[in-house]
Image (cartoon, rainbow, N blue to C red):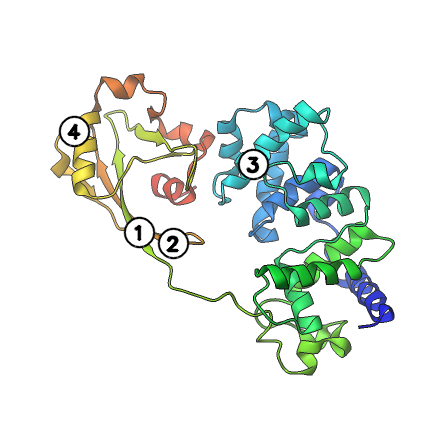
Amino acid sequence: MTGQGEDDFAARLLSWYDQSGRHDLPWMHPRTPYRVWLSEIMLQQTQVRVVIPYFARFIAAFPALANLAAAPLDDVLAQWSGLGYYARARNLHAAAKLCVERHGGDLPRDMDALITLPGIGRSTAGAILAQAWGNCFAILDGNVKRVLCRYHGIEGWPGMPAVEKQLWQLAQSHLPTRRLADYTQAQMDFGATLCTRHDPACMLCPLQDTCVALREGRVAELPTPKPGKPLPQRRVLMLWAQDEQGRVLLQRRAPTGIWASLWSLPEAGDHDDARAWFAKHLHGDYDQAEALPAIAHGFSHYRLQIQPLRWHAIQGKAMVRDNDDLRWFAHDQLLSLGLPAPIRKLLDPNS
């Protein structure tokens, strides 16, 4: 494609954005580096409509980077609870601390320094630099990959290094010389609302007369899907013990892995392990458990079936009272904890 065509790509997107883009998202007013960074992390693998209320609550709790850095991780995870992909919250907290230690409490205005922070890759760093400061950096999130693959007729799964390298080159080639913040938002809005994964509105597209996929009838084929394989299934037992006061026994999860550092119900792989855990920590009869309906929960790399077992008016042994990672919590304390979404919904269906 010619240079004139590449300039035209950005010009058409900006014109479309002026008419049809999103101009009132909460992180735009004001569009500070901290708010841009927070929104970019929250928007990874999560839709705008889901993020908006979480962003509002998070900003209310931690209005500035210094507040986030000084907060206990439990408080950060509690505000994030339900948004999923909790490594994002842990990385956000760790990055804030590093900004205080290394950069005077601010996000660095430098690509190399940004991508050394936990949770910030090249595309996220580019989005921060372009939106917060108007610097000339490309982004390549899922929406942009989809648009570029269709517009240029790029074959191959975008996650393959060779394809991704080609897409970065194209993204860089389309950068305008002005309105970088608007152009960055325009790309994300365009992919999210018009050039969507399913049923894109091609007849409304400002790029339709130069789009290779539309011209060749390959819109549904591009981008090339990731080679698929069935997700493995995993089943766990969740042990829901309530004492005579109605408090729930929760255990802090390990600092790595799924739901790292969140509070959750104690977990066992089978009834033998569950029975042994029960005998070690609780007084009572394991066989009096109430088996509740199973809960299905999907992760990106496997599907989890949770079988809750509940005991009422149970007593804990001494180690429960003395263990910082295994505690009784009253129902009104649950709101202040970082809990996995399916566990929060199980414990409080009205949450």
CB under 8 Å between callouts 2 and 1? yes
Label 2 crowd (10 A; few <14 / some 14-19 / many >=20): few
Q: Amino acid at mark 3?
A: Asn
Q: Amino acid at mark 1?
A: Arg
Label 3 crowd (10 A; few <14 / some 14-19 / many >=20): some
Label 1 crowd (10 A; few <14 / some 14-19 / many >=20): few
Depth check: 26 or 98 in front? 98
Residue tagged by mark 1? 234
Q: Residue at x 79, y 61 (%)?
A: 173
289 relative position to 260: left or right: left
CB under 8 Å between callouts 2 and 4? no
Residue tagged by mark 3? 91
How far from the left and from the top, in percent, is residue 260? 43, 36
CB under 8 Å between callouts 3 and 4? no
How far from the left and from the top, in percent, is residue 12? 81, 67
Q: Furthest residue to the front?
A: 162
Residue tagged by mark 2? 302
How far from the left and from the top, in percent, is residue 131? 76, 46
276 relative position to 55: left or right: left
Secondary structure at numbered mark 2: loop
Q: Cα distance, mark 3 to mark 2? A: 22 Å
Residue tagged by mark 4? 279
* Quarter in which the N terminus is drawn: bottom right
Q: Residue at x 40, y 29 (%)?
A: 332
Mark 3 vs 1, N-terminal side = 3
